[in-house]
Image (cartoon, helix red, strand yellow):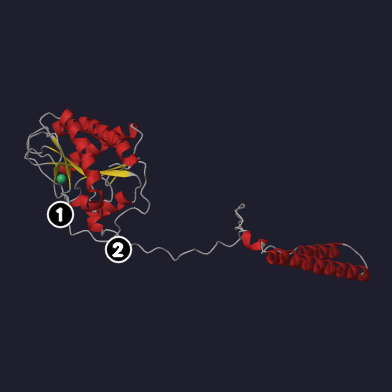
Amino acid sequence: MPPSASANEHRAHENRAGQTTLPVSDILVHVRKSFLRGILLLIAAAIMLAVPACTGQAQQQPPPAPSPGPPNPQAPAPPPQAPAQETPKQPAAPATPSRTLNVVVLDPGHGGTDAGARGGNGVIESEVVLSYARALRAELERQGLRVVVTRQGNENPTPDERSALANRQRGSVFLSLHISSTGPPGTARAYTLPEGVGPPARSGPLPWDQAQEAYAERSRRLAELLQVQLAQKFRGSPEVPAHAAVRQLRTIAAPAVAVEVSSVSALKREQLEQMGTRLAEAVARAVTAYRPLYEAGAN
Ligand SMILES: [Zn+2]
């Protein structure tokens, strides 16, 4: 509550009294006058408050909203409206899904002690997919998309750590990047999780390890668009995506696809890395084609 007018006035008089040399009797007269003025103001305020309540107008008027004025740096911080939110044990989805697709989360598979697939010629999957992530990042950023990567170097975050990072993004799709150990050389495939293999649907939020189930259809649409592009860029690639039980995808609460290039055993490192440019173009085109579907919600 702001200090009352009479209190301010009173303080002003006190200040003035302290600075002047008025006789004591004059000061007493001043104090008495201001005291009376304060009483009169209080009575007037009480009458004004009482009148509308009696006429019923008060009920029609909404209660005064808290002042949205400029913050007072001296005012104490308002108390939190709710106790600090507990970290859910099984977060399955971002709190507020965005209708705008503006983030691509790139997940270079493996890393650290997990090298992934190894070729006889010394090709290591975890290293080449990092170069893919860099190429994809550059191309997607050129398209005006924000890119988040689950690892930048040779670290090896756990699947849950990668998913936690991905699920913090709003308006995103997720792409996990891999290289197979076999398969027709120079081809690429898009995979989504098989649908309907998880436990039966239950009411309420999906647990963490079933997060992807709610996005199965959207993931399939994204994978279809991506596979079309991959087939154009890499001759011999299939025309339609496939299903694969990719562990990483299970906990992603967004459209999620794994992309796998073939293969560490058939191609040299330079050959595989050269595929990165075309892979980036294919992904950028697919994401651009998917964007209006995502944003229309018809996915
Ligand atoms: Zn892999």
Image spot of residue 66 (x, y percent)? 60, 58
Marker count (numbered): 2
Q: Which residue is drawn at 12% across and 28% down?
A: 235
Local secondary structure at mark 2? loop
Q: In which quarter of the image is ligand 1?
A: top left
Image spot of residue 281 (x, y percent)? 24, 30
Q: Mark 1 points at which residue?
A: 197
Res 107 visible:
no
- 266 or 78: which is nearer to us? 78
* Residue 233 falls left or right of residue 56: left
Q: Residue furthest front?
A: 55
Q: Name the residue under label 2.
A: 89
Image spot of residue 130 (x, y percent)? 22, 40
* Residue 38 falls left or right of residue 181: right
In terms of image quadrants, where is residue 129?
A: top left
Residue 161 to residue 231: above or below: below
Mark 1 to mark 2: distance in Å? 23 Å
Local secondary structure at mark 1? loop
In terms of image quadrants, where is residue 280?
A: top left
In terms of image quadrants, where is residue 36?
A: bottom right
Q: Which label's residue is closer to the chain start, 1 or 2? A: 2
Q: Quadrant of the N terminus?
A: bottom right
- 239 or 127: which is nearer to us? 239
Res 17 visible:
yes
The residue under label 2 is which amino acid type? Lys
Q: In which quarter of the image is the C terminus?
A: top left
Residue 181 to residue 231: above or below: below
- 59 or 172: which is nearer to us? 59
Q: Residue at x 84, y 66 (%)?
A: 37
The residue under label 1 is which amino acid type? Val
Image spot of residue 172 (x, y percent)? 32, 44
**Mark 1 or 2, closer to the camera:** 1
